[in-house]
Structure formats: C-alpha cells, structure tokens
Amino acid sequence: MKVLVIGATGFIGQGIYNFLKRGEHDVVAGVRHVEYFEGKAIAIDFATLHKDKELLFKLEGFDVVVNAVGIIAPTKTQSFEQMHTLAPMVLFDACKEANVKKVIQLSALGSQNGSTAYHSSKNRADEYLRALGLDYAILHPSIVYGDDGKSTALFQALASLPFVPLIGDGSQLLQPIALEDLVLTVKRAIDFHEKALELDLVGPKSMTYKEVLEGFREYLGLKPAKFVSVPTFGTNIIGKILDEPTVSLDNIKMLNEGNSASVEPLKKFLTHTPVSMQERLFSLKASNAQKLFASLYFMRPLLRWVLGFVWIWSGIVSAFLYPQPLALELLYEIGVPLGLALPLLYLASFLDIVIGVLTIVGYRLQALLKFQMLVIVVYTLLLTFLATHHWLHPFGPVLKNLPLLISIYILSRLEKFR
C-alpha cells in the first residue's frame, strides 16, 4: 500500500515514517519544507492547508494517510484550532474526495473528556472524522517517550536539577508509551480490516509524576532527589522565560487531570504487552552525553537571558552611567575623530541595547549570535592593535571578551539542538 505520513519531521511522525519505510509499504512524508527532507516527500503545510489548491492532486493514489501533526502549545503562526481542528478537517475532506481508503488520526489520551484547548481541538477533529464515512483509526496516545523525545528530554532535565520541582505532591498519574509500541500500533492499524478502530495508547502500568522523575534521576545516576512543591501561579511566565512551551497552565491542568487508561485493549490489539518505562529506560544507565544534555537543558534559555542582559547593561553604562570623558578617551585612542566620538558612543550604546533585546526575545537568534561574535572580535582586534595597554588592565575588560565569545558560541550550539 501507498502511505502518506504527515508531520514526518516531528518526533512521533518521524518514528512512524522510519518504521514504515523499512517494511513492505511505499511510504511518503508530508512535510512543510520538502527541500530539507531526506527521502520521498510532498509539501503539506497545516498552517496554510485551506489555501492549498493542489491538495487533492497530492493525495491521489494514496491508500492510507497518517496524521501525526501536533503542537503542545500555540505560537503566533500555529494555533490549536488551526493545527488540530481546521487543517485536519480540510485533510479528511480531501482524503474522502481523493478516494483514500483509510485515515489514521493521532489524537491524544483524554481528548474526549479533557477540558483544555489542546484536548478540545483534538476531539473536534476526531468527531469530524468519525462522521465522515471514511475507514479510520483514531489513536489516543499518552505521553510518548523515546531517545529523541521532547518530553523525555524535559523529564531528564527536571530530574537532574538540585531541587526537583513537583506540582502539588506529584501524585498525578501518567502512563507513558514507548515510541516503538506506538509505531507498531500504527503499522497494525494500517493492516487492520475493520472499518473503524479507536485505541488508547498507554504503557502497561500507570506511574505517578513523582515516580517518573525518581526513575529518570536514577537513570541519570544521581542521588535521590530533593523534591520541592512549586505553585502554578506564574507558570506561563516561567515557561516563556525558559522557552519551554510545555510549562504552561493548560499543560499543568492536563497533568492534574491525569493521563492514564486501561492497557488491555492495546495488549489485545498488539498481541503483546507494551514495554514499560522501567524496562525500556530505567533498567539502563544514561550515557555521559545524555547526562551532559540533561544538565545543560535549562542553561540554554538562561544563557540567552544573561547574554541579553550583558549587552543591554553595557549599552546603558556606556551612554549614561560611565564618566563620559573616559568613554570618549577610549574612542580617541583608537583613532576616532573628535567630532564623531560622541555620536559614535551613543550609536554603539544603542546598538548594544538593541542586540540585548533581540537576544532575549530570540529574534533570528543564530544570525544574531554570529553578529555578536563578529562585533566582539572586531572590538577586541581594534583594542589589541590600537590600544594594547587595555590587555594589561587589572580588571581585564578586554580579556573577558574571550569567555564571552565562548559563551555565545555555546549558546549557538545549544540552540541548534533545542
């Protein structure tokens, strides 16, 4: 059969695509940017799907379409309504018109009863698919974990903190499912001959949120955790500061509502018991690279804020707080003409402040970080050749450019693998 996997660059979608292409099916990826995808792919963009006049043509010849698109938090260009409801509806209508034999919809555990915007947006698409008359499989996965999963990375990072934060007493129930069991379920659903299928995708047993964090801490080879209960007040602000969309009031609400279900229907469908988190992860030991990544996870946003503050404060000090004659004297030393020194001082200060603000908001961050390194290198070289004595200053104002350069470079690498 010819299968289209939409969302094949995401953690779950990529897992489904990679698993299916090793089998007997002809598998094609549906992605936003075909030019960056290695493999057979067509352009499918949920953000603008209603404007895609070639959608029917793209779907022709496919036997099965798998919708693995999902976002954990809305952005300026991607809302729950668009990504989870409106675009899937457009897709399902097009599948029916293009005579696609089956649609497999990756929904969410608890979508039928959940009270959050995330759950309700998923549920509206599920209901639309049920009523459309297509053969379908609606799969409701719990938290999906695996080697490259964002939830796995976040749990590891939280577990590695000196004081591990808990929401309430940490008794919320979770039932994570391994990516391997999810993709196998999708494979079985493709070959399933009944007209309709709905399954909750969960691990073999539920665990409390606290138990999950304890398991990850042991997996990382750390001493037993010191837990601290944190309030939910200000959660959205903290999430924005840490650049962590999963840290939000809605997601905490989903956590408190619980994320568990009976595993028996899935066991029957797969004809085996899904692997537990204890077997899949906690019986092993993390590699040094995984330990390093967990320890640096929250350093990325904090480093961005610190660097932004350094640029902003440097601009304010240079223009308004540092004695102006001394600041101008530095410019004279490197050959700036008398009449240009003051305007240049204010221009450089303004540039520093702008760089700092853009760093904090994360605007085109990779390009901005390269520009920061260029500015510091040029500034350092000018002082090196035109005012060498600043290298001998006891407080090391020029010497400190070296660790600053390294910090900017480290942030650029961390951002690349976020």
Image: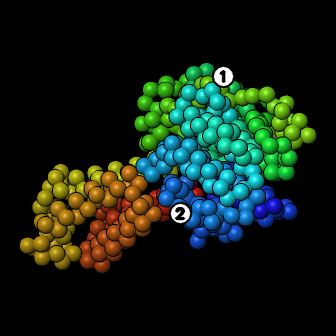
Q: Is disc 2 placed on a helix, strand or loop?
A: loop
Question: What sort of colour scheme is used for the picture?
Answer: rainbow
Residue 246 sits above or below residue 318 on the image: above
- Residue at x 86% of width, y 39% of height: 269
Between 395 and 346, which is closer to the camera in this rendering?
Answer: 346
User: Hey, which quadrant is residue 354 in on the image?
Assistant: bottom left
> Picture quarter containing residue 131?
top right
In the figure, 161 relative to 355: above or below? above
Q: Residue at image x 60%, y 25%?
A: 256
Residue at image location 76% in from the left, 58% down from the top: 63
> Where does the C terminus fall, quadrant-wise?
bottom right
Q: Position of residue 159 (x, y in %)?
A: 63, 37
The number of discs equals 2
According to the picture, the residue beneath numbered tag 1 turns out to be: 171
SS at badge 1: loop
Q: Quadrant of the N terminus?
A: bottom right
Q: Which image quarter: residue 202?
A: top right
- Badge 1 crowding class, 10 Å Cα cut-off, few under 14, some 14 to 19, many 20 or more, is some
Residue 23: image location, x then y, percent:
85, 61
- Return the residue at label 2: 53
